[in-house]
Amino acid sequence: MTTGARVPGTGLFYGWYIVGAATLNGAAIIGMTIYGFGVFLPSIRDDMGWSTAAIAFGFTLQRIENGLFSPLVGYATDRAGPRRVTFIGVTLVGGGFLLLASVQHLWQFYVAAIIVSFGQSMGSLGPFGAAIMHWFRRHRARAVSFMMAGTGLGAFTVYPLNLIVEAWGWRGALVAAAGLVFIVGYASAFILRDRPEPMGLQPDGAMETAEEVAARAATSSYGLSVGQALKSYAFWLLLGAWIAFGFTNLTWVALQFPALKEKGFSSNEAGLAISAYGIMIIIMRVLLGIVGDRIGRRRMFIIAFPLQAAGMAAFALAHDHALQLVPYYLIFSVGHSMYVVTSQTVVADYFGTRRFATIRGWLGGIGSVGGASGPVVGAWVAESVAGGYTTTFAIVAAVCAVAIPFVILADLLRPRLEDEPMAATIGA
């Protein structure tokens, strides 16, 4: 007897339903928690009388807390399973938004912001990414690319969210945001399944007999323990690369708007340039996910760093003409999308899936905390050093370039997984 690898009546492998749920989950939760922050900030400042810096510190707390708790969330995901963790995370995000809507003091704002951040790490990309590593082997990059396209779609929640803030005020908009998170978050969690084997399925939707599924179910996870991963050179080299990316990415996200204004672009032109980039990376992530499984995910991960460094250099050198941004768009969008598509898959390719979420949690957590200095350093350089934001992004390009030998050596020194299934090596 052969098990069905497709959902009855659709002909579609169930893993792709999980990917679709992850895409919508990311659009809603990342859209509200990351992109939506800037929409609420001016109204909260005007209503509560708090300074912009004091409110923005809540966002900084979110990023630091998200990094510090990533290893714990990864451990919980490996032990309890992605589905259970997602339900808890969605509850925390929605509940945190309701708390934010009722705050009267700054300390209450900070507490609610931390709850939202903790929920985001539990209820969105982390657990969904862990599940996808089990549901896909040959097509991991493609699956992750669709999931990460959802974070790009999250940027499109900014405009309607701003309309709600104008109509209902920031407190009413936060209640609406909580409602969206509960609806989309819980729906996506109901679709999520930790592994294909309990459903009688095989990764990537391959067909096999029921007896083969039963025999393989007990050993569906493979790879290193956390302790073994921490003892490998590859882990520490990857960590250096993740810190460099964190520094690059957080500086770019936080300072690209003021940098464009310093270069001579108006506020509307700067906003349009950033929106146009958002559209581009959605397309790039999907296309490069397909390419990554063909040319090799580890190879694409390595290529991502010189392209990001060159892209940041192009941004630093651009001035007040839109055409001068074209090299930045073309180069950085490819490099950045390559990293986003492969950064999770290489963890599974290097260390296996047995403790994927915990190992990724350590990498992402330390990487985020290490990279959190980027916006602070970048802003100080722009204000204090000759050249302003040109100097800032030249430094960012250099930091990203430093990571190139790290990722090359990490690949050369990656652990050999004795229990790795043959299918997991295809596309790696």
Image: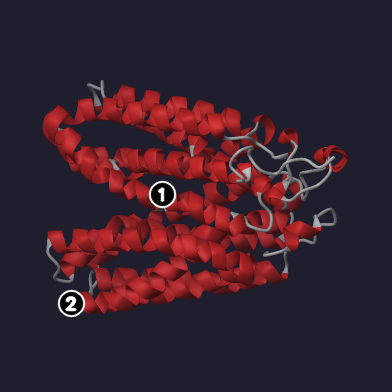
From mark 1 to mark 2, how far is it between C-alphas?
28 Å
Residue at screen point 52% across, 27% down = 87
**Residue nearest the observer in this picture, 191 or 13:** 13
Residue at screen point 56% across, 68% down = 291
Residue at screen point 66% across, 67% down = 410
Does 281 appear above or below 178? below
The amino acid sitting under disc 2 is: His
Does 308 appear above or below 140? below
- Horizontal and vertical percent for residue 251? 35, 59
**Residue nearest the observer in this picture, 139 or 416:** 139
N-terminal of the pair, mark 1 or mark 2, is: 1
Q: Residue tagged by mark 1?
A: 151
Is residue 406 among what the camera can see? no
Left or right of 27? Residue 412 is right
| Label 1 secondary element | helix
Quarter of the rendering containing residue 157? top left
**How packed is label 2: few (under 14 Cα within 10 Å), some, or many (20 or more)?**
few
Q: Residue tagged by mark 2?
A: 321
Closer to viewer: mark 1 or mark 2: 1
**Residue nearest the observer in this picture, 343 or 139:** 139
Does 304 appear above or below 253? below
Left or right of 121? Residue 422 is right
